[in-house]
Amino acid sequence: MVILAIALFAIAGVVVSTTMLMAHTMERETAVSLAGEKLDDLEQDYEDIANGSDNVDKYTREWVVNELNDVKTVEVSVTWNGVLGTRSVLMEREYAKFEL
């Protein structure tokens, strides 16, 4: 009987860990999607690319722009408080000035 109880507690721990991992994966997927969306939005007009931040639900997006030789490098970080604590993702893209 004691062995059965120990086994059941171990199985319950696996279920909880799996559920937390699944929730974290979904949160991370949303954060990556939000970072990609912001990089796509900034691509619309080279001249308008500038530092900024915003909030989307529980996620905070911040983007930092560095310019060198008509190339702007943008880093977008997305931070959130999730099931595994405070987490963040970082994406970077370069934009070049295009002239015809």
Image: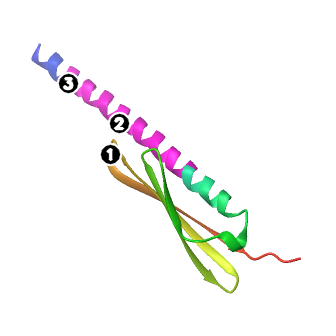
Over which residues does the magenta segment extend?
Answer: 8-33
Task: Kindly indicate whether the residue at mark 2 contacts the one at mark 1 (C-beta within 8 angstroms).
Answer: yes
Label 1: how many Cα within 10 Å (few below 14, some 14–19, many 20+): few
Name the quadrant of the C terminus: bottom right
Badge 2: how crowded within 10 Å, few (<14), some, or many (20+)?
some
Question: Looking at the picture, does residue 45 appear above or below residue 57?
Answer: below
Element class at badge 1: loop
Rendered location of residue 17, percent (x, y):
31, 35
Residue holding disc 2: 20
Q: Amino acid at mark 2?
A: Met
Write down the residue under mark 3. 9
In percent of width and height, residue 15 lies at 32, 27
Viewer-nearest of labels 3 and 2?
2
Residue 66: assigned label: none
Residue 34, percent across and down?
55, 51
Looking at numbered disc 1 in the image, what kind of residue is underneath it?
Leu
Viewer-nearest residue: 16 or 5: 16
Which amino acid, mark 3? Answer: Phe
According to the picture, the residue beneath numbered tag 1 turns out to be 84
**Residue at far right of view:** 100
Q: How far is the residue under mark 3 from the one under mark 2? A: 17 Å
- In-front residue for pair 8/18: 18
Q: Earlier in the sequence, mark 1 or mark 2?
A: 2
Indicate the colouring scheme.
rainbow
- Which SS class for mark 3? helix
Give the left or right position of residue 61, taking residue 37 as reference.
left
* Residue under the point 16% across and 23% down: 6
